[in-house]
Amino acid sequence: MSKAKESKYYINNRDFTNEIIRCKHGLLNEETGYQHVAGELSPRAIEYFIILANRAILKLRFSNPLDKEDCIQSALLDLLRYWKNFNEEKSNNAFAYVTQITKFAFRQFIDKENNP
C-alpha cells in the first residue's frame, strides 16, 4: 500500500470551491456531515480564509508588525463581506476570486496608510 501523496499546495482549489458553494446554498457536506446554513460560512471555510490571508501577506514587507496584523484583518473583513458574490456559473475557481479580494484589501489598506 502506498501512502497518498501530500499536496504541495496549502489549500486544495476543488475542496475550497466546493466548501464556498455549500456555504452559499446551504448544502450538506457529506464528508464531515456538517449541514451548512444558506449564506453562512462554515468553520472550515473561515479557516480557509485565515490560511489564505496569512499566506498572501508573506509577499509584503511591513516596518511595523501591527500594520501587518491590521492588513490581515482588513482582508478578512472584506472576505466576510464579499464571499457571497462568488458566482459558480461564471467560474469554478473560488480560490482565485478570494485571492483577488485579499490582494485588493491589502492594496486598499496600504494606500489608506500611506495617504491619510
Image (cartoon, grey):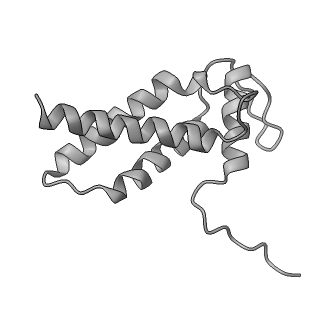
- Where residue 72 sits, quadrant-wise, is top left
Task: Tell me what residue is drawn at x 63 percent, y 38 percent.
Answer: 94
- Say if 47 sits above or below 90 in the image: below
Q: Determine which quarter of the picture holds residue 90.
A: top right
- Quarter of the image where one finds residue 115: top left
Left or right for 93, reference 55? right
Q: Is residue 29 above or below residue 3?
A: above
Work out whether residue 44 can be spotted: no
Residue extending farthest to the bottom is 1
Relative horizontal placement of residue 103, taking residue 110 as reference (left or right) = right
Q: Is residue 95 shown above or below 56?
A: above
Q: Residue at x 60, y 44 (%)?
A: 95
Residue 16 point in image, percent of width and height: 66, 44
Across and down, in percent, residue 54 comes to 40, 51
Query: Residue 112 location, x and y as percent?
Result: 19, 31
Q: Is residue 89 left or right of residue 100?
A: right
Q: Residue at x 46, y 35 (%)?
A: 101
Tell me the quadrant of the picture where the C terminus can be found: top left
Whether residue 2 can be seen here: yes
Q: Residue at x 23, y 39 (%)?
A: 110
Q: Nearer the viewer, residue 96 or 66?
A: 96
Q: Is residue 53 above or below residue 39?
A: below
Please provide percent x and percent y for residue 18: 73, 38
Frontmost residue, 43 versus 39: 39
> Which of the two residues, 59 or 26, is positioned nearer the viewer here?
59
